[in-house]
Amino acid sequence: MTRAPRTRPTLEEVAAAAGVGRGTASRVINGSEKVSDRARQAVEGAIAELGYVPNQAARTLVTQRTDAVALVIAESEERVFGEPFFAGVVRGIGSALSDARLQLVLLLAEHAQRNGRLDEYLTRQHVDGVLLLSLHDDDTLPDRIRARGLPVVLGGRATEDQAGAFVDADNVLGARLAVDHLVHRGRRTIATIAGPADMVVGRTRHAGYLAGLRAAGLPLDPDLVVPGDFSQESGESAMRVLLSRRPDLDAVFCANDLMAAGALRVLREAGLDVPTAVSVVGFDDAPLAQSTHPPLTTVHQSPEHMGREMVGLLLDTMAHPDEPPAPRLLETRLVVRESS
C-alpha cells in the first residue's frame, strides 16, 4: 500500500491546531501587534509542530512588503569579486540585513547594462528598497528608482553637493591626512595616482591631495598627477608615466591600495628604494596593505562599516518615509607602515 504524499500544511490547519480563527493566525504570521500573547504563542507552537512555511507571494499581498533589499553594484564582475573594498561592503550589508531578517538580492550591472531587465526588476513587487554602490556621474538609475516610490541609499555620492540618503567616507580629509604625513616626512615633490574623474570618490580624494599641497605651500604641478581606474594595472602604468615625467619625485599618494601596490611594483623594478627614495601612501587599508613590500602606509576606511550604515539608513528611510534622510559621513584615519 503506497502512502499519500505529505502535503504542505495550510494556514487553516495552523489555525485549527492553535484553536484560533484563520484571521488571527494570519495576523501572527504577518507580524501584526493586534494579537494577544496567548494567541501568538498558540499559533507559533502550531507553526513549529506542523512545519508550516508561509506562502511568500500571499504574504506580500497582505503586508505590501517583500522582505528583500536589492544591492546594485555598478561595476564589472571582475572588479566586484577582485577588489577587497566591494567584498567588505557586501559583508557589512549582508550581516546587517540578516540581523533585520531581510533578504539580500545582489545585482551586478555595468553602466551599459542598466536599462531593460534591471529597471523592470527594481519595483515594489520584488524589493522593499535599493542600495546603490559605485555610481558614475551620468547615472540616472537613482532617479528612475525613486520615481517608482522605492527608497534608495547610495554608497558614496553621485555629486559633491548631494544631500539625503547616502553613506560615504570622508575622502577629502583622508587624502589631506596622507599628504600632511608625507610633508612632515620631508617630502616636497609629491605626486598622485588619482581615481577616476567621473566619480565623486576620485574627485574628492584628489581635492584632499590638492588641499594638502596648498596647506604646505607646495606648487600644484599637473605633471605630478596621473589618473587611474582603481585597478593595480592602472597603478603600474600611472607610476611609469610619473617616473618618465618627473624622475625627481620623492613621494606618491595613490587614491586606493590596489593602485599603490602597482606603484610599489614599478618603483621596485626601477631600482628605487621605498621609502628612502620615494614614499608611498595608499587609501582603503585593505588586507593587501599589510602584505605589500614594504607594508603600505594608507588611509583607513571600513567597507563593512559602510555597508552596515547603508542598511541602517535604508531601514530608517523605510520606517519614516516622510522625514528627509540625513547623510552619514564616516571617519577616515591614517595608518602608518614602512612604505613612508
Image (tube, rainbow, N blue to C red):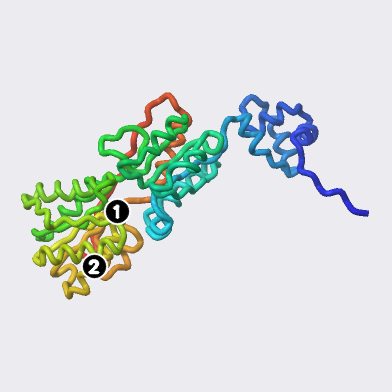
Task: Tell me if residue 305 can be seen.
Answer: no
Three-letter code for the amino acid on which mark 2 is drawn: Leu
Q: Which mark is residue 300?
A: 1
Three-letter code for the amino acid on which mark 1 is drawn: His
Relative to 272, is 141 above or below?
A: above
Q: Quadrant of the C terminus?
A: bottom left
Residue drawn at x 72%, y 41% is 52
Between 201 and 214, the one lying in front of the other is: 201
Answer whether labels 2 and 1 touch (C-beta < 8 Å): no
Between 197 and 192, the one lying in front of the other is: 197
Which residue corresponds to mark 2?
264
Residue drawn at x 31%, y 33% is 163
Specify few, some or many for label 2: CA neighbours under 10 Å numbering under 14, 14-19, or 20 or more.
many
Specify few, some or many for label 1: CA neighbours under 10 Å numbering under 14, 14-19, or 20 or more.
some
| 233 lies left or right of 184 | right
| 290 lies left or right of 340 | right
Q: Quadrant of the N terminus?
A: bottom right
Relative to 203, is 143 above or below?
A: above
Relative to 339, is 302 above or below?
A: above
Between 158 and 293, the one lying in front of the other is: 158
Q: Position of residue 101 (x, y in %)?
A: 55, 42
Label 1 element class:
strand
